[in-house]
Image (cartoon, rainbow, N blue to C red):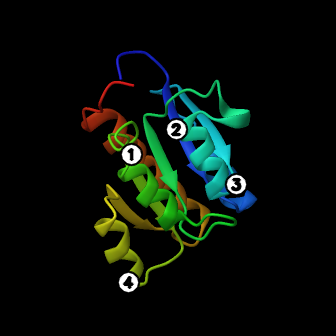
Amino acid sequence: MHGRPVQVLLVEDDPGDVRLTQEALKSEKLRVLMEVVADGEQALDYLRRTGAFAGAVRPDLVLLDLNLPRVDGREVLAAVKSDPELRMIPVVVLTTSAAEADILKAYGLGGNCYITKPIGFDEFRRIVRSIEEFWFEVVKLPPR
């Protein structure tokens, strides 16, 4: 990412998973700036830079839980991938659901990858670090 901080939007309503993700993304190699919103409505406001999020920085990556209050993650994903201003932002679905229907729906809506949250901190940290390595060191992301 050429020295600039990496901007991540975490859309997650579970405070424990927020903490785990923040801890796992503390990196020696990268400066990761993470914004957290707790529901799908806030996620869409953030991404569209409306309301309380008018000054939000466009994220390089969205980590999206599916089971969210107010507007669920499937609706957020559909809205992001159908919006010409937002569709280029990679969306990683990071959720507890391993249901085949959820996996198919997420990919069908344009999700960039689907990861089932593991149980246990060490495995969770390994998964998040893999996301970090792939999306911020291997992949060439579109400019903000």
Residue holding disc 1: 83
**Residue 9, image quadrant:** top right
Give the number of the mark in front: 4 or 1. 1
Give the number of the mark in front: 1 or 2. 1
Give the alpha-carbon distance from disc 2 to disc 4, as whole Å. Answer: 27 Å
First-in-chain label (2 vs 4): 2
Type of residue at label 2? Val
141 relative to 36 in the view: left or right: left
Foreground: 49 or 4? 49
Rendered image: mark on residue 38: 3
Give the number of the mark in front: 2 or 4. 4
> Can you give x and y, in whole percent of width and height, for residue 51 in the image?
70, 36
> Can you give x and y, in whole percent of width and height, for residue 85 in the image?
39, 36
Please report the residue visible at 53 percent of the width from the left and 54 percent of the height from the top. Answer: 125
> Can you give x and y, in whole percent of width and height, for residue 29 in the image?
45, 27
Give the number of the mark in front: 2 or 3. 3
Type of residue at label 1? Asp
Q: In the image, is residue 84 above or below residue 12?
A: above
Give the alpha-carbon distance from disc 4 to disc 1, as whole Å. Answer: 24 Å
First-in-chain label (2 vs 3): 2
Element on which disc 2 rests: strand
Rendered image: mark on residue 101: 4
Rendered image: mark on residue 75: none
Foreground: 68 or 124? 68
Residue holding disc 2: 8
Foreground: 109 or 82? 82
**Residue 4, image quadrant:** top left
Give the number of the mark in front: 1 or 3. 1
First-in-chain label (1 vs 3): 3
